[in-house]
């Protein structure tokens, strides 16, 4: 079973975490099931960027992002070449190391 290693995030996961992850589940669902309350304003429907993560290790093991995800990622705060929307990125059989960005653009919370 692959591990999802979460780098420390000052609010959501101050100590970081190493989580056993089931292949075929999303990064977002795995985080939420393990008490890491990553934002997901669109309820995981690929309609916002609040669940944006940066995959520091294992990026190549993830299925490619579709056009809709790629278009949304262009709007994410702190976008990097190895960024993904955690609600769309399906964990495979390889360990992943992820970073949750310090900020997210939450248009619902910010009243946009």
Image: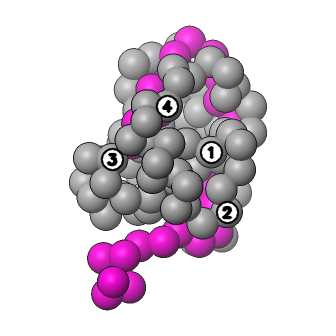
Mark 2 vs 4: CB contact within 8 A:
no
For label 2, count other residues whose C-alpha is less than 10 Å away and answer few (under 14), some (14-19) or many (20+).
Answer: some
Residue 72 seen from this side: yes
Query: What distance separates the C-alpha of mark 4 from that of mark 3?
Result: 11 Å
> Secondary structure beneath disc 4?
loop
Say whether disc 2 or disc 1 marks the residue closer to the N-terminus: 2
Return the x and y of residue 37 as percentages of the image width and height.
42, 59
> Secondary structure beneath disc 3?
loop
- Please name the predominant secondary structure of the magenta segment in the image: loop
Query: What distance separates the C-alpha of mark 4 from that of mark 1?
Result: 10 Å
| Figure check: 28 above or below 14 | above
Q: What residue is drawn where x is 38% and y is 41%?
A: 68
For label 4, count other residues whose C-alpha is less than 10 Å away and answer few (under 14), some (14-19) or many (20+).
Answer: some
Q: Quadrant of the C terminus?
A: bottom left
> Secondary structure beneath disc 1?
strand
> Which span is picked out in magenta?
86-112
For label 1, count other residues whose C-alpha is less than 10 Å away and answer few (under 14), some (14-19) or many (20+).
Answer: many
Q: Picture quarter containing residue 31?
A: top left
Instruction: Please indicate whether residue 54 sits to the left or right of residue 38 in the image.
Output: right
Q: What residue is drawn where x is 37% and y is 76%?
A: 107
Q: Which mark is residue 28?
A: none
Question: Badge 3 is on which residue?
Answer: 46
**Magenta segment includes 95:** yes
Say whether disc 4 or disc 1 marks the residue closer to the N-terminus: 4
Question: Badge 1 is on which residue?
Answer: 83
Q: Identify which residue, 110 or 11, lies in the foreground.
A: 110
Return the x and y of residue 55 as percentages of the image width and height.
67, 39
Q: What residue is drawn where x is 71% and y is 50%?
A: 80
Question: Badge 4 is on which residue?
Answer: 65
């Amino acid at each position: 079973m692959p591990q999802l290693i979460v780098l420390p995030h000052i609010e959501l996961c101050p100590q970081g975490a190493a989580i056993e992850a089931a292949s075929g589940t999303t990064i977002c669902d795995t985080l939420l099931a393990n008490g890491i309350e990553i934002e997901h304003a669109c309820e995981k429907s690929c309609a916002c960027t609040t669940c944006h993560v940066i995959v520091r290790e294992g990026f190549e093991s993830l299925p490619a992002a579709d056009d809709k995800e790629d278009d949304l990622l262009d709007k994410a705060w702190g976008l990097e070449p190895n960024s993904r929307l955690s609600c769309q990125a399906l964990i495979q059989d390889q360990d992943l190391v992820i970073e949750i960005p310090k900020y997210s653009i939450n248009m619902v919370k910010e009243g946009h």
